[in-house]
Amino acid sequence: MSFLPARKGRHRQRYQDHLRLVAGCIPYRLQKDVEDRNSSVTSRINVLMISTPNRDDLVFPKGGWENDETVHEAACREALEEAGVKGILDEDPLGVWEFRSKSRQNCCNMEGGCRGYMFALEVTEELDSWAEQTSYKRKWVSNKKPKLSPEEAYKFCRYDWMRDALQVFLSAIEERGSRRAEKLVELPMFPAADSMAEHQMLTSAGCSEKPPTVQHLEESFTNKCIVQG
């Protein structure tokens, strides 16, 4: 399979307040083959992390946000380049963290400082080959033994700020699952006749409905970044 090489260099790098701007994501998927359907959402979460050579710890995909792309496009690009996955990115970030780059971890000043925007990415496609496959290996973290649970992933997470992002992510997913459960209780068992007829008309005309909150963003490297509000 052919793919475009990963971007190199910092000639397009964005900066703000003397901080390098970074975009990344926490890729995830929900297990479907669980025995207990009443279990919490977080117990069914699979989180994707990546490893680097000669290290036992793990990180999430992230990298520089460049001046020819949106922050959402940057997060999607990093997921594709480093982890070889595509998916649906949340429109709102999990948060914004300030930290030092790995080469400046022990500095006492803000030289090498970064400001990172992290998003949740629901994985819909996992590629067999990707740009930085030789540098990064994928590891799905889940509650299925002998794999690690998301909670156990904290101790393998390389950076404190990424642990914070993971905690925010798990809390957000749990809250989202609770809201969905409440909505399902309120929904009728069958769709209204008018809605069914309208759907049939659209289908027969070769159309498919898309939620208005889902926006497709075309990137220069032909990857489609889907942002969901």
Image (cartoon, rainbow, N blue to C red):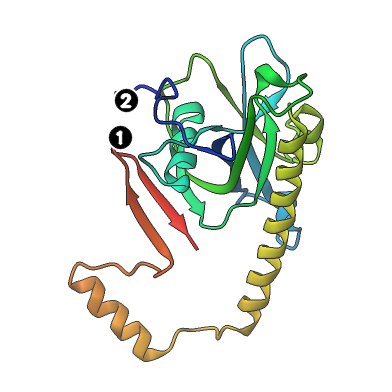
The image position of residue 52, as x and y in percent, is 61, 17
Crowding around mark 1 (Cα neighbors within 10 Å: few <14, some 14 to 19, many 20+) is few
- State the mark number for residue 221: 1
Classify 62 as above or below 121.
above
Q: Which residue is mark 2?
A: 4
Residue 208 image-quadrant placement: bottom left
C-alpha separation, residue under disc 2 versus residue under disc 1: 7 Å
Q: Secondary structure at mark 1?
A: loop
Q: Secondary structure at mark 2?
A: loop
Of the numbered discs 2 and 1, the one sitting upstream in the chain is: 2
Classify 210 as above or below 33.
below
The image position of residue 23, as x and y in percent, is 54, 39
Classify 38 as above or below 198.
above
Quadrant location of the N terminus in the rendered image: top left
Q: Amino acid at mark 1?
A: Phe
Q: Is residue 132 visible?
A: yes
Q: Amino acid at mark 2?
A: Leu
Classify 106 as above or below 71.
above
Horizontally, residue 42 falls left or right of residue 64, namely: right
Question: Which residue is pictured at 73% across the width and 31% down the height?
Answer: 147
Question: Which residue is pictured at 58% across the width and 48% down the height?
Answer: 119
The image position of residue 203, as x and y in percent, is 25, 71
Q: Is residue 28 visible?
A: no
